[in-house]
Image (cartoon, helix red, strand yellow):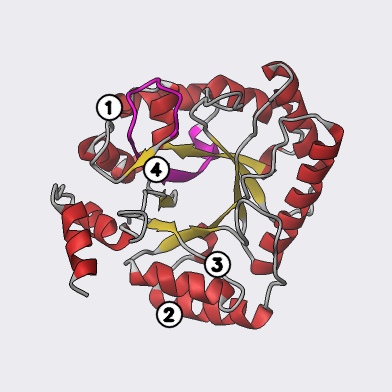
Amino acid sequence: MLIIGSHVSFNKNNQLFGSALEALSYGSNTFMFYTGAPQNTIRYPIRDDLTKEALVLMKEKGIDFSKVVVHAPYIINLANPDKEKYDFSLSFLKEELKRCTSLGINKLVLHPGSHVHVSKEEGIKSVIQGLNLLLKDDLPVQILLETMAGKGTEVGSTLEEIKEIIDGVQNKEKIGVCIDTCHLNDAGYDLSHLDAFLKKFDETIGLSKIGCVHVNDSKNVRGSHKDRHENIGFGTLGFDTLLKVLYHPLLENVPKILETPYVDRLYPPYKEEIRMIRNKKFDEQLIEKIKNSQTNF
């Protein structure tokens, strides 16, 4: 069964219940969310009553809660060893892990970070050090390192860098990987030869470590290191390549999450994209149809 959803909102009034309702409105059977704005530190207390309502709703509607994912905020950067910034990142990530635990979420996607003013090797060591401080045996959450596009001084744009981090983590059960199709393309990997890529991933890291797939088309040519998402089928990856990722048998039990751009920066495309994916037929008029449906609403 295809496990597919998208990024959804999580606000202080409805929290997880609102996230689940939004996901269901798109025809999803999973979803991903931030527990607060990804660009700042404002966080509201988790309401257990709303979490319980959400769990009941998801059970009724066929969403496997074990496949729901949280994304850590962008402002966390474990690859920058500057003491003040590093301590902040550690503290904030620790709180995010606590919030995941309160919600019952078992997977947290994390950008490895950017090494900024030090070498990449030092940045990777910094990430490893931070993860080893956080990933304790009693932690019920697994951190999924996201594959990055290689923009600027990002760490984790190659499978070898991800492997180096995982190899340095002491508690291997608490660490995994989130592969992002746009990021992989922009980092230089050719997903049109998906079996070859998955073979390389298995040989380098191990397919069992993949805990989430971010499914995004790319505005950029392969190897551009730019990280600009495009709607499904409208970018350089193309619909057929992404469909192979979505339906590959080796990734069958892994949640697939869309992070594609809003149409005109206003309208979420997820309902229409998910329908197109389930139909396995590309609709080149999709964006115009979304615009028209909103205009005529």
> Residue 150, percent across and down?
52, 25
Residue identified by numbered label 3: 10
Circle 3 sits in a helix, a strand or a loop, which is it? Answer: loop
> Residue 119, percent across and down?
71, 16
> Residue 112, percent across and down?
63, 34
Q: Earlier in the sequence, mark 1 or mark 2?
A: 2
Circle 1 sits in a helix, a strand or a loop, which is it? Answer: helix
Q: Earlier in the sequence, mark 4 or mark 3?
A: 3
Magenta segment, which residues? 207-227
Tell me which corner region of the image, top left, top right, bottom left or bottom right, holds residue 124.
top right
**Residue drawn 62% across and 74% down?**
12
Name the disc covering residue 60, or none. Answer: 2
**Residue drawn 76% across and 51% down?**
92
Circle 4 sits in a helix, a strand or a loop, which is it? Answer: helix
Q: Earlier in the sequence, mark 3 or mark 1?
A: 3
Residue identified by numbered label 1: 192
For the residues labelled 4 and 3, the Cα–Cα distance comes to 27 Å
Which quarter shows the C terminus? bottom left
Q: In the depicted view, which residue is nearer to us: 30 or 264?
A: 264
Tell me if residue 284 can be seen.
yes
